[in-house]
Structures are given as structure tokens and as C-alpha cells.
């Protein structure tokens, strides 16, 4: 019997007026409704994570490493910028290394025509390098501004809720399996 899975939801956008707040709020509600998770938020807009880091000044890096290290699973909420994912998200990902390993990640994406799916496919490549298992199923919102009303409620919630349920079920399965595996056999000795 595995305890609750610690899932960290990571915001992909740091843009002023970002739509990420609306989509992430919806995703948070869905995760909260799933009784198997306890949820933490990592928002790069609230972290001091300078691109140029010096030995003495690393901003919130230690805090970030602890939070990623304590997680069992991740949900990334990301938009698409120029057929990729935002630079702030890449910087956050690259700032941490071993703490990501042997854990699963799932994606909620949004954007214009593609619903952020091109950003997700790029993220799969990046996370493979970090020994992370990415979930096959995704949740995506095309033309995101047409999907939510001014209170952040979906006009047509049924399909995205069903998609999120399935994706979270997969995330929970992998997170529980990998948590047990990490406890039985440390992964870092074979990670290089
Ligand atoms: C710099 C920039 C580039 C964008 N490029 C794309 C794109 O390639 N494909 C797409 O579907 N949407 C694109 N968009 C639209 C965004 O996905 C949409 O505006 C989304 O709301 C941005 O997320 P945010 O509001 O949380 O920052 C772009 C937006 C910006 C600001």
C-alpha cells in the first residue's frame, strides 16, 4: 500500500497576464479531487532563479531542488511559444538534475491551434534525458481563450475532465511503482 503521492504542479509561463493561472487553477482542482495525491505548486514567477548563477548567489535554487527532490510525480502546465515551450520552464528544468530522476511527469498544455502539443513533444525529449517517464496521455486546450469563461470555468468540461482523470490515473500508477522501486533500489548508481 503506497501513501499519498506527492505531486508537484509546475507553471510553464511567467508572462504578465498569463493564461497559465487559469489553466493551472483548473488542473489544481482536478488533482485535488483525486484522493491519491497531495499537491504542491512550483511557480517560476515566484522563484528567484537568475540565468547567471554564481557560486555564492544561487537564489531559490536550494529550495527548488528540495521541492523537486521530495516529489514523487510532476504535472507541467505549459503554453506553446513559437512551436516550443517557454524559456523560463527550460531554465527551471535545467537548474535541477538528480532530483528529477526515476519519477513520472504528465502534461496539461494550451495555446492557439495546436493546443500546446508541440511544446509537449519537445518536453518529452528533454525529460527523457533526465530519466523521467512521461505519460502517454495528455490534456490540451486549443484556442484556450475560447475554452474558459471569465471565472475560469470550462464551457464544455466533460472531455477535458475525462482526459485529466485518465492521465492522473496513469501518473498515479507510475508514481506508486517508481516510488516503491526507488525505495528498494537507489536509482542514482545507474543514472550516468
Ligand atoms: C511569444 C509567443 C509565441 C507564441 N507562439 C505560439 C505558437 O507557436 N503556437 C501556439 O499555438 N500559440 C502560440 N502563442 C499563443 C500562446 O500559446 C497563448 O497566448 C497562451 O495564452 C500563452 O500562455 P500564457 O498566457 O500563459 O503565457 C504564442 C504566444 C506568445 C506570447
Image: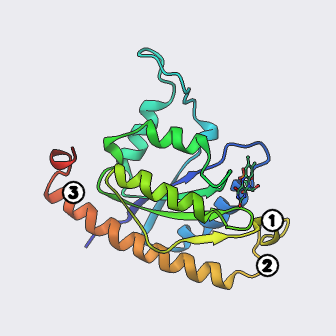
Q: Earlier in the sequence, mark 1 or mark 2?
A: 1
List x then y, in percent, for residue 179.
Answer: 27, 61
- SS at circle 3: helix
Distance from the alpha carbon under mark 3 to that under mark 2: 41 Å
Q: Quadrant of ligand 1?
A: bottom right
Q: What residue would you read off at disc 1?
A: 145
Q: Which mark is residue 167?
A: none
- x, y percent for residue 61: 46, 31
- Dots 1 and 3: beta carbons under 8 Å? no
Confirm if mark 1 falls within 8 A of ligand 1: yes
Picture disc at residue 155: 2
The disc, 1 or 3, on the residue closer to the chain's N-terminal end is: 1
Q: At x 59% / y 45%, what residue is drawn? A: 43
- Specify the label residue 182 is tagged with: 3
Question: Circle 1 — which element?
Answer: helix
Asked whether residue 66 is in view, the answer is yes
Q: Nearer the viewer, residue 123 or 101?
A: 123
Distance Cα–Cα, label 1 vs label 3: 41 Å
Determine the residue positioned at 56% across, 26% down. Answer: 50
Question: Residue 192: where, in percent of width, then height?
Answer: 21, 43
Identify whether 96 is placed above or below 73: above
Give the alpha-carbon distance from disc 1 to disc 2, as whole Å. Answer: 11 Å
Instruction: Give the colour scheme shown.
Output: rainbow
Residue 74 screen position, x and y as percent: 45, 58
Q: Is residue 8 visible?
A: no
Amino acid at each position: 500500500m503506497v501513501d499519498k503521492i506527492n505531486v508537484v504542479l509546475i507553471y510553464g509561463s511567467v508572462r504578465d497576464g498569463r493564461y497559465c493561472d487559469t489553466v493551472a487553477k483548473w488542473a489544481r482542482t482536478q488533482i485535488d479531487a483525486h484522493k491519491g495525491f497531495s499537491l504542491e505548486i512550483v511557480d517560476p514567477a515566484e522563484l528567484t532563479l537568475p540565468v547567471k548563477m554564481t557560486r555564492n548567489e544561487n537564489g531559490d535554487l536550494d529550495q527548488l531542488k528540495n521541492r523537486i527532490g521530495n516529489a514523487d510525480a510532476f504535472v507541467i502546465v505549459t503554453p506553446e511559444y513559437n512551436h516550443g515551450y517557454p524559456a523560463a520552464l527550460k531554465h527551471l528544468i535545467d537548474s535541477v538534475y538528480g532530483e528529477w530522476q526515476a519519477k513520472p511527469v504528465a502534461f496539461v498544455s494550451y495555446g492557439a491551434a495546436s493546443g500546446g502539443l508541440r511544446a509537449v513533444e519537445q518536453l518529452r525529449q528533454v525529460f527523457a534525458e533526465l530519466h523521467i517517464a512521461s505519460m502517454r496521455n495528455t490534456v490540451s486546450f486549443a484556442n484556450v481563450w475560447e475554452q474558459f469563461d471569465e471565472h475560469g470555468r470550462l464551457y464544455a468540461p466533460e472531455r477535458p475532465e475525462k482526459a485529466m482523470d485518465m492521465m492522473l490515473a496513469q501518473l498515479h500508477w507510475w508514481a506508486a511503482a517508481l516510488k516503491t522501486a526507488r525505495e528498494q533500489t537507489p536509482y542514482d548508481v545507474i543514472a550516468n
